[in-house]
Image (cartoon, rainbow, N blue to C red):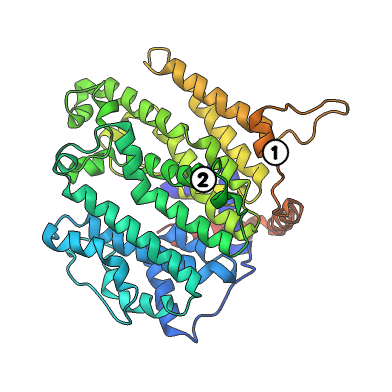
Amino acid sequence: MGKLVQLLSHPIELRSVLILKYIQKNPYAINVDSNPTLKRCYELLSLTSRSFAMVIKQLHPELKDVVMVFYLILRALDTVEDDMSIDSKIKIPLLRNFHEKLALADWTFDGNADTEKDKCVLLEFDQILKVFHTFKPEYKEVLTDITLKMGNGMADYILDDNFNLNGVKTIKDYDLYCHYVAGLVGEGLTRLMVLADFAKGSLLSDPKDLVLMESMGLFLQKVNITRDYYEDLLDKRSFWPQEIWSKYAENLKDLHVPKNVQNGVHCINEMILNALNHVPDVLNYLSSINEQTSYQFCCIPQVMAIATMSLLFNNKEILSNDNIKIRKSETCYLILKSRTFKGTMEIFEYYLKSIKSRLQVEDPNYLKLNIQIAKIQQYMEEMTQENLPEGIEPKKSDIYVKTQKKLTVDDKKMEAIISEEQATLNSISVAVIAVIVFALFKFYK
């Protein structure tokens, strides 16, 4: 009953759930039943990530299978790195040489603990390899290169005894760690999209734009690290930089002690302040993608990240709760709303305003947070100066000149699709909607 009340209390989200579940069409749906190996890989994808599985299956056929396998490879790598039961004498060589496994025709790994929920990708890695070897050489080269870089980066941190005991020390170290576990993902996806001619080549060739793909990964990772404070604490791991948390406690674990909760909240907000620095780059990057499904694939995690960031802000619950997530119905709304660049900007604007409205003067970063949010809002305003009154010239700041290139995604076509979906939903009777609402419980389980 609680979930039904939650749905009915958010009617816009309810509409999105209905559209996403029953009305939206996948223009690139394919039947994998004739290929058992490919079918099993998509099943593994669904087992390890419901949200990513949804958007990957919507991708253009040129990159759909490639990105699916890329995700599974990195999920396998991450499952090795996360498993604290694997002896470092086994784990480190495996991480460093994991890219070499991609050259094999048949390889699996059964050394994970039973508690590792994603161990299936390693137990059935031979299925992933079979699909990997069907790709174009240039795609395989990208996947192998990113796996090499990420595996070695993970191994370097495991060897760092200070990191194991105290986490990262400085913000610079924090950025480097996020680069290895997330920034490299952004690099790999960018290289794939440029190869497929789905994104502007300047993302890889222009020195000014190289930072954009890095920020895509760092923004996501920093939001996740902030959210996972308590879960990591239970696992005896630490990723919050000492340069930040040492301002608020002698030890990171002290932040969740009841008497230190206010300091803990202030520390959370400074972690969010650090992550906000990447938002302008994220928006700039998204404006450089010129294929609709690739745009949505890159955009959806980012809008979910800004929504999660808003949920975390000033939220003491994350200091003692390892299950802080945005509502599934809210996720459905974000997926649909972000299909156009205009919609994406509106999402970011909404959550930035939400954060700003909850700023408290006593927060030591009150002024810095205000300034950073204002900078982002100004940046967004300059990116969207398309419909100015006659005779009014757009601002010519450096930011405007660099970013004011219209997204080549056909927003008008997407708006037409959105209107059609809404018209279809409006034609459904109230009685039918009531039946569908109850059917959604299966979707939510």
Q: Work out which residue is located at the far bottom of the displayed protein and give it.
A: 34
**Lower position in the chain sequence, tag 2 or tag 1:** 2
Horizontal and vertical percent position of residue 10: 55, 42
Label 2: state its secondary structure: helix
Residue 77 relative to residue 430: left or right: left
Residue ID at (70%, 38%): 404
Circles 2 and 1, Cβ within 8 Å, touching? The answer is no
Task: Quarter of the image for the C terminus: give it.
Answer: bottom left
Label 1: state its secondary structure: loop
Q: Which residue is mark 2?
A: 210
Horizontal and vertical percent position of residue 32: 50, 80
Q: Which residue is mark 1?
A: 404
- Local crowd at mark 2 within 10 Å, few (<14), some, or many (≥20)? some
Quadrant of the rendered structure where residue 263 is? top left
Residue 85 relative to residue 429: left or right: left
Q: Which mark is residue 182?
A: none
Task: Please name whichever residue, 410 or 151, is drawn nearer the observer in this view of the structure.
Answer: 151
Task: Please name whichever residue, 395 or 83, is drawn nearer the observer in this view of the structure.
Answer: 395
Tag count:
2
Query: From the viewer's perspective, is residue 359 above or below residue 388?
Result: above
Residue 317 relative to residue 301: left or right: left
Amino acid type, label 1: Gln
Residue 179 relative to residue 330: left or right: left
Q: Is residue 49 visible?
A: yes
Q: CA distance from mark 2 to mark 1?
A: 18 Å
Horizontal and vertical percent position of residue 156: 23, 50
- Local crowd at mark 1 within 10 Å, few (<14), some, or many (≥20)? some
Amino acid type, label 2: Leu
Residue ID at (52%, 55%): 190
Horizontal and vertical percent position of residue 70: 42, 65
Query: From the viewer's perspective, is residue 355 above or below residue 90?
Result: above
Q: Work out which residue is located at the far top of the displayed protein and give it.
A: 362
